[in-house]
Amino acid sequence: MSSTHTTSSKTADWLDKTADWIVDHRILTAITTLALAFVVYAGIPNLRLDTDGRVFMADDNPDKMVLDAFEQEFAKDDNLAILVMPKDGEVFTPATLQAIGALTEDLWNLPYVRLVNSITRFQNTYADGDMMVVEDLVADPFSVTQEQAAAAKDTALDRTEIIGSLINEDASATAISVIFRLPGEDLVTEIPSILAEADPLLASYRADYPQIDFLASGSVAVSQAFATASQKDGETLTPAMLVAMLLIVGILLRSVTGALLILVLAALSAFVSLGALGWTRIPINSATAVAPLMVVTLAVASSVHVLSSVRQTMLETADRTMWARRAIADHGLGITVAVFTTAIGFLSLNFSISPPFRQLGNMVAAGMIGVWAFTIFLLPGLICWLPLRRNQKAASVDRLMNWLSDFVIRNQRPLLFGIPVIIVGIGIGISQIRLEDDFLRYFDERFETRVATDRYESQLGGLNVLEYSVDTGEESGINSVAYLSRLDDFAAFLRAQPEVSHIRSLSDTIKRLNMNMNEDDPAHYRIPDSDEEASQFLFLYELSLGYGMDLTDQINVDRSSTRVSAFVPFATTTMLLDLDDRIQTWFAETAPELKSPVTGQTHVYTMISARDVPSMLQGTSLALVFISFVIFLVLRNLKLGLVSLVPNLVPAIMGFGLWGYMVGNVSLAVSIVVAMTLGIVVDDTVHFILKYANARKRGKSAEDSVR
């Protein structure tokens, strides 16, 4: 049997024969397609969720290499930053100090803990005659008196080292800092195992101390929040989107069965993307978790073309096999070109320097292969077998498209001149766009981590940290008075920067030790007079530190370099890059011998955003050129190939233009939308241009071809 829909084109004849073969062998093609799909699905049980934010850092990322070297030199600072805010606005009361002391002890029991630091455990130094005493600020928080609490408050508010980090300026909020040494062997379970114990612990303290707010932020909490957000989106947004799409498709096609068919194909295709990732044994992460959602959207776009054709053929015949033959013959080439050009668009994400975005592109590309296979080889059989009710009235979407095509043809000249004006007017909004990111605020206030982060940075300063390893160039060089003086100058410069809320520098510790060793005389709050004094004071201090406390996270092993940390609240990528530019200028002009590249987790994420957006825009541009070349090869028409660039580019131009007017900031996440938008746009462009080209080959006028 052959399709009644024939053209003089050899390509059309070949498509007719292919459609005939697929429909005639629909049982074989359906079983084979599903069998191959289930082979891919076998990878799904291998999927695990990776909650570590460092998954966005590629091993060959130069900024990641600098961070690795820095953490090898000092320490790896994955942390929980717990904000403690008594509702009476006073940290230094016996009841609050008792709660802080108890929580400090309990937090030591969390997995992978390296250090727990709090206001009660702050290592206070003072002179006792000609001796220096080093002890906890609150020696026994469980039996502290009001007088002792008041004395501790006075001491704390006089310590430059902790104002803006462990305690705020009016002593109404304090922090408990929990530093972890994650092995990095099982990124899937390490962070969840920490929070599996930390969350119930904090919940118990909230119940026991209702007069105190306990809020958790920090890198560990933020990493988990990304995973939680992805999971919640999967539980809410995906079902909502599916329901909305099914309703729209069902209404436009006037077919409940057709809508369910699309749901089946979309789900099967989404599982292909998950199975493909599972076979690689790469854990799913907050970026790749959205891949099934993208595949579903694109699967709907492809299958709608087929079912729309079925609706049109219903008006002519009740033969179900003819519905399937006509649909594949008319749309098979368009679907094939659209699917593979869409896959090319997503493969452009491999230009990203961040592994999860590369994986996202590859997952969606794999899903698109599934979309093609199910649409071409499974859907025809389902059309023949399932009870699709024949409706001899034109579908709503057909009537809508007929009206739209007539409107465009009647008003082609006004539209030809008017639409470019609109495009330019909206596109100018791109000039308002700024490449800005704030990774700590990717979540809204529904997430406890976002609320905790905002309150923490409002009360205590920055969770974004710029790190510097200030090297002396020689072993034990940190004891040099000349070096320490330069280090103190650097600390003073950092404190003068408006973005910086707090800094951590060894020079502050050395100055206080010098004062302590001179009977707490404020005049001696300065760098010691000799290298020998600096060395002795520091050695004595290190010997006197309490349990679990040391300076290995501030001084490297051969004592040739010290760590300086600048804390920046409410920071965007532009702010951080601008601040580091000023810091590097200071090094170059004031202390070139100490010049240090910036590092830290915050900086690596900042550079991922700064480098990735241009990289992905470049990849998308190349994908557009390649897609147009593919269309040219299929049509063998250079003019139509070039014309296809216009509808492929305009939606992105208008989308970013509107975004520029309405929002202004473009983050890394927003730039990913370009690839998804490109996929949907290319699908529509390919089908329209192929339909137009075929109509022209059959001798139709340009107007009728548009219809």
Image (spheres, grey):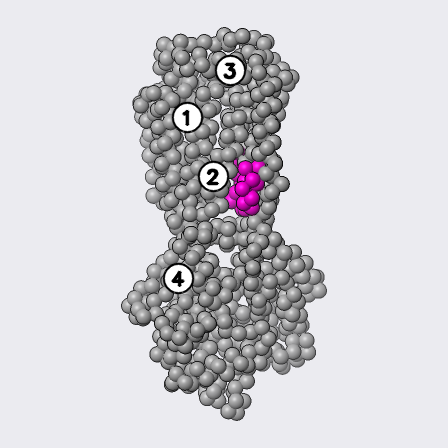
Q: Amino acid at mark 4?
A: Val
Location of residue 540 with respect to 253 vertically, above or below: below
Q: Nearer the viewer, mark 4 or mark 1?
A: 4
Q: What amino acid is found at the position of numbered circle 3 in the picture?
A: Ala
Q: CA distance from mark 1 to mark 3?
A: 23 Å
Q: Is residue 404 above or below residue 629?
A: above
User: Between marks 2 and 3, how big is the CA–CA gap?
Assistant: 30 Å
Name the front one of labels 2 and 4. Answer: 2
Residue type at mark 2 is Gly
Could you tell me how far apart the alpha carbons at marks 2 and 1 are, in whole angstroms? 21 Å
Q: Residue 694: percent from the left, percent from the top?
A: 40, 15
The answer to if 276 sits in the magenta stretch is yes
Work out whether 524 lies above or below 230: below
Q: Nearer the viewer, mark 4 or mark 3?
A: 3
Whole-number angstrom distance, CA of label 4 to CA of label 1 = 46 Å
Q: Which residue is mark 3?
A: 19
Residue at x-position 41% and y-position 79%:
479
Query: Which residue is disc 4 drawn over?
Result: 598
Residue with the mark numbered 1: 685
Camera-side residue: 290 or 50? 50
Label located before the other in sequence (2 or 3): 3
Residue range of the region highlighted in magenta in the rendering: 275-295
Q: Which residue is at a point 57% across and 16% down the rendered structure image? A: 25
Q: Please give the residue where the numbered disc 2 appears in the rendered image.
A: 361
